[in-house]
Amino acid sequence: MTTDLTIRAPLPPELRGEAETMLVTLTVAGQLCGVPVLSVRDVLGEQVITRIPLAPPEVAGSLNLRGRIVTAIDLRRRLRLPPAPPGTPRMSVVAEQGGELYALLVDQVSEVMTLRAAQFERAPPTLPQAWAAFAGGVYRLKTGLLVVLDVARLLALTPEG
Amino acid sequence: MDDLLADFLTETNESLAELDLALVKLERAPDDAQTLSLIFRHVHTIKGTCGFLGLPRLEHIAHAAENVLGRMRDGKLAATPDVISSVLAAVDVIKAIVAGLAASGNEPAGDDTRLAASLNAIAEGRTPAMAAPPPPPIIPTTTATATAPPPAVEAVKPEPLAEAPPPADPAGDSHAGAQTIRVTVDVLEDLMTLVSELVLTRNQLLQLARRQENSGFAVPLQRLSQITSDLQEGVMKTRMQPIGNAWNKLPRLVRDLARDLGKRIELVMHGAETELDRQVLELIKDPLTHMVRNSGDHGLETPAERRAAGKSEGGRITLSACHEGGHVIIEIGDDGRGLPVDKIRAKALARGLASETELAAMSEAQILRFIFRPGFSTAAAITAVSGRGVGLDVVKTNIERIGGAIELRNAAGLGTTFTIKIPLTLAIASALIVEAGGERFAIPQLSVVELVRAGMGGEDGECRVERINNTEVLRLRERLLPLVNLRGLLALGEAAADADTAAHCIVVAQVGSTMLGIAVDAVFDTEEIVVKPVAPILRHVTMFSGNTILGDGSVIMILDPAGIARATGVVGSNEARATPGAVKDSPEAHGPQRTAMLIFRAGGPEPKAVPLGLVARLEHIEKARIELSSGQPVTQYRGRLMPLVPLSGTLDRNAESHPVLVFADEDRGQGRDRCMGLVVDEILDVADEHLAIELSGGQQPGLLGTAVIAGKATGVIDTGYWLQHAAQDWFHGARGGRPRVLVVEDAEFFRSLLVPSLSAAGYAVTAVASATQALALRDAGTAFDAIVSDIEMPELDGLEFVRRVRAGGGWAELPVIALTGHAGLADVAAGRNAGFTDYVQKFERDALLASLRQCLAQSGALAAPVG
């Protein structure tokens, strides 16, 4: 995939206007990220995850969320980051795509942040490919940068990864 | 209750509810012609329908009310409150009668004469309703009121209600008012999910409560538990449909059948309202239709035969259904001639399914079960209706596939009844929980044949895991089964060293007609599971048919034995159909077929191979056990002499023991049970290969050609040649008049396998590579006794070929057997329509030979070879 940003999909509406945007912030390998609060169905603590043999590497397994089977996607793997040190508790953010539930495994889910459009920037074109593919943009915060992740693209998995 | 009546009650209850409203409205606006005509229509409909259903009391009242309304509509009578009251009183009586009908199915007794009389009086315009008229001396309208006592004032009050039976119980009321609403399947599925979750939570709570003695929660929990179970049952019910939905096409079918066959057939159906899961309903539709057809075609006699047997001319087919436990029992019975036990016994003997002694020891019921064997047919003639084979094997397979069973009762001269027992639902299936590589998996109980522990058993109950080079195979009693290690298959870490294998539990699974062993680390319990489809991202993993949540709340994957068989090449892609409960669509890969090949070395360094399916057993025979008989090496094997043929030409006298491939032809009924041992130097491996064989065309005797197997050029041996080498009687070369069989098969490889198989069985075989070549032979006047043809061929396919054969020429009457990977009901039907005599799964040698024998016997051609 090329990282030609000009032909990328338009920004989500909530990121375009003057309006404020609410993001659920989370941490993956030390990087602060955010996903739109409206795309989040649930936030889960440490879960029992059943491994699925022969599944794509990004698929961590499946878990039981109130009687529904949820496919867990390891965000570190999806972003081509090194795996979490063994034994670290992971949290997950549950999102829906095409009627199916997916849990994005992250290191930490922090808070819901309200951000102004003025703080928003397009993702720099120099981001590594794996990040560029999923980053919808960047917010400048006092403490650092927050990368907005595009949930739909994160979940658009193909058997090849 | 009668369906018609139930419909009427539902409709009437709806009308009555509207009538109340409309009458009240009319009272407020007496000039509302629209409302008036609505009321009139409703009452008129009720009257009309109950006349039709034979409900005199209801009709009487409705008629009287209609008279009054008619006058009002015609403007002859004002809609005064009094008049309205009397009509309402009539409506109340109608309601009471309807309630009685709903409760008991019969019109409740009661006397309405006074009400009717007063209504009629109003209609006459003589009586201001509330003015307590003097008894009208003559009431001319209805005969029933002729002797009516003077209508009293109370008559127009809802007093008649008191005459009606005590208000029906609420259940009766709701039955009559059984109204339906449309709900999308999604809503139902969501409810089902929520209920499953509720059940899990309930179970967890119960577990917690059990640990605490005298907990105050115990009683409310008990109650919660009960309600949860009821709720679960209720939600399950929403998926249910009456079995009548699967039956509604049958009356027409039976009528047409009767006309075509010149029989008189009455179809009686009981229990059409018996409910079962939608999914199951769909799956039993075809088998049921098939069986009803069979009953009409084979079971029932012609009117003349029936007369001769002292029965009524008209035959009867009875279909009934009822619930029993968690199952639905369906019976399909006829009062026909019954199954011919003697014919079946003779046929079983002729087909070599059992020996005479075995048959003698069998009960009649056991003998009757032969009709469920593939291709078994006793119908003397081929009819257009049922085809030649009764196809009961297909019915049986389909029913067993959904976890059902089929039984039959037979009374000679009185008829046959088939009983089918099927589960209510497939959404909940029984599954075996196994463990491999630290993960748990569910295997649908339906496909599990048995559980064995490798290495157990002595001489008799043989069950050993053996290795051919690095490939494990399972030796189970008399069979050699392919063995897959679940851990290896699912990439859950390599199976530990050899020592560990012995401890494996092996699940013997059946996929279609193939068995395979699946080695697992541990076997737990069986559990009822709710099958759920896997996420789209995982659909490409064909090893899984779905996933589920266990009682302890953990998610586990459901293994699909068909997918495993396909993935490991144990069966061709066509044979391994998705098992029931497989939610996802398995992609129908029509790819090249893979064949398991046994690779060995003999008479040279280059590897040689033979299809594993042709090898009966692998043995090591010690030097001491090899004897000479008229110069030929033989060994005593399983109580008889087995000729040993060294593939290399000479037997190495120095070797301590020899690996031997045993080829056997066990056809007990024919009294032939021969075997031959092919002595090789070393057995190397088993490989699954898509065979691209390069035929050497007889360059080297005993070799079919060369194929690339496991990356090496490998000689594929010609089994037929070596069998012939072993014993001349495997071939009946010397005997004249061998039946001539034409084989039409485009794949060179299969042709090369078929020809020796058929030759070995005593046929004179001619093989051609295309239908066009075959037709050229016909046009050249070449004669055959039977044709075996592939279906899928380029250019001219098997179906078109058989149509052309049937269309005319010297072969029009010949039996033609289709050879195919697809033997679904629809395929079989299509094949039969095109003109095929029988359908045989590709590579089922025994089935093909049996079919040939039968076809030749039926076509009255040369007797099929008997041995």
Image (tube, rainbow, N blue to C red):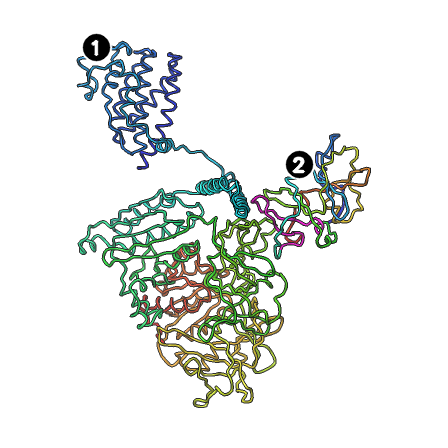
Q: Is residue B80 above or below residue B228?
A: above
Q: Amino acid at mark 2?
A: Leu
Of residues B406 and B788, the one nearer the viewer is B406
Q: Is residue B92 above or below residue A117?
A: above
Q: Amino acid at mark 1?
A: Pro
Of residues B765 and A149, the one nearer the viewer is A149
| Residue B159: image location, x then y, percent | 29, 19
Q: Residue at x 38, y 27 (%)?
A: B14
To which chain does the residue with label 1 belong?
B
The circle on residue A38 is 2
Q: Is residue B771 visible?
A: no
State the SS at label 1. loop
Q: Is residue B116 magenta?
A: no
- Which segment is the magenta one? A55-78
Of residues B815 and A130, the one nearer the viewer is A130
Q: Is residue B445 visible?
A: yes
Q: Residue at x 72, y 45 (%)?
A: A108
Q: Is residue A109 left or right of residue B764?
A: right
| Residue B360: image location, x then y, percent | 29, 70
Extreme residue toward the front, this view: B214
Q: Is residue B215 left or right of residue B162?
A: right
The circle on residue B134 is 1
> Are labels 2 and 1 on one chain?
no
Give the crowd class for mark 2: few <14, some 14-19, many >=20 residues within 10 Å. few
